[in-house]
Amino acid sequence: QVQLVESGGGLVQAGGSLRLSCAASEISSSLNSMGWYRQAPGKQRELVATVTSGGSTNYADSVTGRFTISRDNAKKTWYLQMNNLKPEDTAVYYCNLDYSRIRPGIQYWGKGTLVTVST
């Protein structure tokens, strides 16, 4: 079973920065998409950013220009650099490893890391 472990969450003031990391126990195929999602209290989980094995990135409108996703295939790790954080970015952030392109429905989730942005 693939395990994903997030790190880097915490408490930060508005305008500050955090860098989240997600390490996978294994990567069985290079054809995958690595991503970050978040869930704020009382809200549904939403996509934050994804990066494909080909390097294509996708961002939610609310984070475009402030967040950057990247991946290090050799380390089986991907990152979310979050700058100019806002209180509305407060949420539990989950990393995702998606093989659906080649194995429909196969994806894995981390347990989440809490990001709290204070005013």
Image (spheres, rainbow, N blue to C red):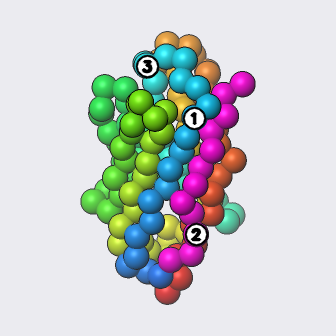
> Residue 33, percent across and down?
45, 30
Residue 80: mark in rendering: none
- What residue is drawn where x is 62% and y is 63%? 114
Residue at the bottom extreme? 119
Q: Residues within 10 Å of mark 3 (few under 14, many from 20)?
A: few
Is 64 on the left or on the right of 33, as rendered?
Answer: left
Residue wearing tag 3 = 30
> Residue 80, percent across and down?
43, 52
Closer to the camera in the image, 96 or 63: 96
> Residue 109, percent across and down?
64, 38
Residue 24: mark in rendering: 1
Which callout, 2 or 1, points at the residue further toward the start of the chain?
2
Please say whether residue 42 is visible from this viewpoint.
Answer: yes
Is 98 on the left or on the right of 55, as rendered?
Answer: right
- What amino acid is at disc 1? Ala
Closer to the camera in the image, 46 or 57: 57
Q: Where, by quadrant of the figure, is residue 97 drawn? A: top right
Give the magenta range: 1-12
Is 55 on the left or on the right of 107, as rendered?
Answer: left
- What amino acid is at disc 3? Ser
- What residue is drawn where x is 49% and y is 55%? 20
Question: Total number of numbered labels?
Answer: 3
Of helix, strand and loop, which one carries label 3?
loop
- What residue is drawn where x is 56% and y is 14%? 103
Residue wearing tag 2 = 10
Work out whether 51 lies above or below 49: above
